[in-house]
Image (spheres, helix red, strand yellow):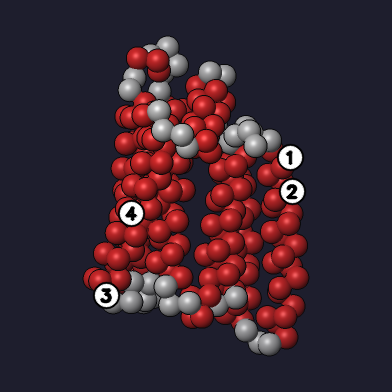
Amino acid sequence: MSWTKDLSVERKMDIIFYILLIITLPFKLMNSEYDKVFSIILTFFTVILTSIVFSKIKIKMPTQVYFIVLVFIFLSMYLGKVINFYRFFPRWDKFLHLISGPILTLMGYIIFLNLINKKVYKGINPVLGILFGVFFSIACAGGWEIFEFTSDHLFGTNAQNNSLLDTMGDIICGTIGGTIMGILMYLPLRGKNVPFFKKMMIDLEETIVKK
């Protein structure tokens, strides 16, 4: 699978998600689960907003990244909120923070490739881009907790469970996930045989930097 951009594929993924939400909606309405109905509507608009952002931003983002983001929305908002995985699986939130680390590290690395001047790219140590991705991931983990803290105090929500332990646990999980992703991206640079990540790094460079 080549890490290249194909908008038609992205639209097909959107449609599949919309159909899933539309199918789920009547069941929640019949059961008077109006909080779940709200979550479905919120998920619907989140997918629309994600699609708009990816199509309008000047940063080149491969289709695979869009797919990964949609999968994360599915896991967190659909399975987590609509299907109630947060209640069924007490560690579901920590799992999501853990996998958000690799996703954000990858996005940070892609942002770095877009920002770098093509003329000087060959003279830059590729480790710098990976470090940028990892620190971007850690910063996002901290930023999300600031958002939850603000929401809890302004709107009376309880996203952080009134617990410093929960907050730090989320940040640590995101940091661990992002760091592991950074290591896996670094291994091919050291000549280690990690085929998937080696191909990913080559495809990203050819798609973003060399075009």
The C terminus, quarter of image: top right
Earlier-in-chain disc, 3 versus 4: 3
Q: CA distance from mark 2 to mark 1?
A: 6 Å
**SS at badge 2:** helix
- Residue, disc 1: 8
- Residue, disc 2: 12
Q: Residue furthest bottom?
A: 31
Q: Is residue 102 visible?
A: yes
**SS at badge 3:** loop
Q: Is residue 39 visible?
A: no
> x and y percent of residue 16 in the render?
73, 57
Q: Are marks 2 and 1 in contact (CB under 8 Å)?
A: yes
Number of callouts: 4
Q: For this rendering, which residue is in front, 5 or 21?
A: 5
Earlier-in-chain disc, 2 versus 4: 2
Earlier-in-chain disc, 3 versus 1: 1
Amino acid on which the number 4 mark rests in the picture: Ile
Q: Is residue 5 left or right of residue 87?
A: right
Q: Residue furthest top?
A: 119
Earlier-in-chain disc, 1 versus 4: 1
Indicate which disc residue 176 carries. 4
The N terminus, quarter of image: top right
- Residue, disc 3: 163
Which residue is painted at 33% across and 77% down in the image?
Answer: 161
Q: Are marks 3 and 1 in contact (CB under 8 Å)?
A: no
Amino acid on which the number 2 mark rests in the picture: Lys
Q: CA distance from mark 3 to mark 1?
A: 44 Å
Q: CA distance from mark 2 to mark 4?
A: 33 Å
Q: Is residue 48 left or right of residue 19?
A: left
**Labels 2, 4: front one:** 4
